[in-house]
Structure formats: C-alpha cells, structure tokens
Amino acid sequence: MAREGGSLSDDKIEIVNQLLLPHTTEWLVIDTIEQAHDAIKTMKIRGAPAIASLAALSVSQHLSRALRADPPPEFLSSPEGLKTHVSPILHFLFTARPTAVNLGAATRRLTRRLQASLNAGKDARTIAEDLIEDGRQVAAEDVGRNKAMAKCGGDWLVDKVKSTGGSGNGLNVLTVCNTGSLATSGYGTALGLITYLYETKKLGRAYYTQTAPYHQGSRLTALELKTLQIPSTMIVDTMVGSLFQHHDIHAVAVGADRIARNGDTANKIGTYNAAVLAARHNIPFIVVAPITTVDLDIADGSGIPIEYRPPLEACVVRGALYPPSLDAQGIKAQAAVMITPEELDGIYNPSFDVTPAELITAIVTERGVAVKGSEGRFDLNSVV
Ligand code: MRU
C-alpha cells in the first residue's frame, strides 16, 4: 500500500513499513528513487501489485519535482536527454525484486510511453508529463480491477460449489501469504475474493497460513482480516494437510507473482505445498491476479526467475515483546529474534515456489475466469 498526493505540486509518497506490522504502524516517506528501490528490496513494501505501484509512483514523483525545479535539471532540456536520464532509473527499479512480473510490467509500460512520446515528436517537458500520468495510472487502476476479479472469482466459486451439490453458502476458503490491501493499492486479489464472499454473505470462514519465514500471513493477513472483522482462523504452515482432513474447506485462493503462458504460477513459498494437498483432497485451487501478473513471454514455470532472500531472514522472527504492556514501560516493542544457532552450514530460502498448472483449477483476472479445456490446458488469452 502506497499513498500519494494527487496533483503535480503534491507528490508526497508514503508507505506503511510492513516490516513493523502488525504492532507498529509507521508511515515512511519516500522521497527518492533510491528510497523506493530500497523499500521494495528490503520488503518494507511487498506484494506484486504494490511494489509495481510504488516504483511507478516514484518515477512520477521524480519527474514532477524536476518539472517544478528552478532552474530545471539539465535532462529536461531535450527529449533525448530525458530518455538518457529516465531509462536507467526504470531499469534500476526493475531490478529491485525479480519474481513479481508486475514490477517489470510497470517499468515496461513507462518505457513504452517514453518511446511513443518521443516518436510523436513531443518536447521533454510534455514527455515528462506523460510519464507522470502513466505512473499514477499504474497505482490508480489497481483497486478497480481487484474488485472486478474478486467478483468474477467469488461468483465462479459459488457456482462451482453449487454444481457439485453444495449450497454455495458458508464457504470456507484457505489462503496463503498476504494478498490484501497491503499487497495492492486496495481490496486485494485472493483476499479480495474472500472479502467479496464475506460482503455477499457467502463466506463461512477464511483460513490463512502463517507463511513462514516472513510471516505475511500471521502479521499482515491476520491484521487485515481482523480489521475487516471477517471470521478467520490462522494455521501454521505445516497444518494444511490436517486442516483439509478435519475441516470442510471449499477452496484455496492464492495470489500470484508471475503466471506463465501455460498457467504455471509462482507465488509465495508454501503455495505449492497447499496445491498438492488441495489436489489430494479434491479442493478447487484458485489463482487470483491482475492481467499484469500474466507473463505470456514465458512458456512455463521453469522460465520464472525465483528470488532467494538473504539466509538470515529464515533465521529470525519479527514481532513485539510479550506481554504488550511492556511497551508502555518504555521498552522497545519491536524485536527480531534469532531462532537458530548462528552461522548455520546451509539455509535454503527461496521466496517463491511454482505451482504447476495441472494443480490449478482456475485462474481469475479482472477479465474473467480461465479453466482448463478438455485437453487439460489453460488458454490464458481469454483472460488477458
Ligand atoms: O514476498 P512477497 O511478500 O512480496 O510475496 C507476495 C506474494 O507472494 C503474493 O501472494 C503476491 O505478490 C500476490 S499479492 C496480491
């Protein structure tokens, strides 16, 4: 979640520092491209759509400040000068995290706009204004499309459950990681679907995994569901199988960081485990993501770059001291606690895994729901 002022002269960007949630709400001001890059890389902001929005907004901010500067910076003196200045910035932002394709989609969109404006023979200031507009659009478009995909996916699930003899009410849905307002510009993707079911009185209960090692589930999804007052139950990641054995779960709904042309989907580590178990228990497994997450240039999951986070991140948990009343006594509430011996021999810490298309029942975007055809393959052209 990133917020900013809405006019050329009001380009303040603020993000919630997600490393400190849920116990501390700290708004960080993003003033430079470097700060935006750092916030994305260190996961102060995370979630595929949210990092794309921040990257795009930071380009808008940078250019709108340049337009107001007196004297104007040298790069605004010619269209080529602007291109030479902006292109490395877009590349730098693109490199902040590798797996979420939305970041690349946003920087590519700005690159295309830059080139189109250059081709149209516009002057540097007008091109900068075009880029500012596009950067803001990237963030602004997000909420509307989330609501659209939540409705498509939610209605589809209700019908699917009815088609197998269920009532379509009281649906229990498991999710992984955090895909709500914190991960997007608002409402969320998979968590948006759960919210939609709740709002339309179709939800029984939301279940969510803690999502180790970063705990996006127990820190962020827990906070969002609590705030929205949606009935929910947290489970430890190792309990998915047990949950499916002992509770009536109607679907698993997850977000995505990149969906390959054949439907193979990269999402938060642990998603693949949940998909294998869902298949074993015949539970529909639904991926909910905007079309900017679909990467038609990649044939299958083997081509998706997987980010490996620093090993130390798998050795610590973050949180507040317990009991929270210690905070009132002036003791620092936030702590990162080491849970392993120091300097372990080996630590495997991929941030994402790839769920093969064969384990996915439906892929939902703002354009609709894709299911596999009779030959068992997705045709994603219908939803992009
Ligand atoms: O490492 P993160 O927290 O950025 O990973 C986030 C996820 O995997 C989400 O499920 C995905 O980005 C979709 S967010 C709507």
Image (tube, rainbow, N blue to C red):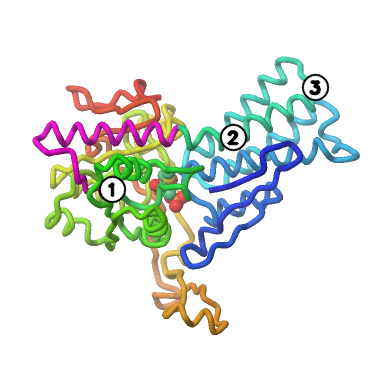
Question: Which label sits on residue 272?
Answer: 1
As helix, strand or loop, the secondary structure at mark 2 comes to helix
Asked if labels 3 and 2 touch by Cβ distance under 8 angstroms, the answer is no
Q: Which residues are magenta?
A: 145-173
Residue 263 appears at what percent x and percent y?
32, 32
Q: Earlier in the sequence, mark 1 or mark 2?
A: 2
Q: Which is nearer the eye, 211 or 262?
A: 211
Left/right placement of residue 282 relative to residue 229 reads: left
- Type of amino acid at the residue the image marks with label 2: Thr
Task: Say which quarter of the image contains residue 340.
Answer: bottom left
Answer above or below: position of 259 versus 33. Answer: above
Left/right placement of residue 369 relative to residue 71 reads: left
Quadrant into which the C terminus falls:
top left
Confirm whether residue 328 shows in the render. yes
Question: Which label sits on residue 107?
Answer: 2
Answer above or below: position of 169 versus 244. Answer: above
Label 2 beta carbon less than 8 Å to ligand 1: no
The secondary structure making up most of the magenta span is helix
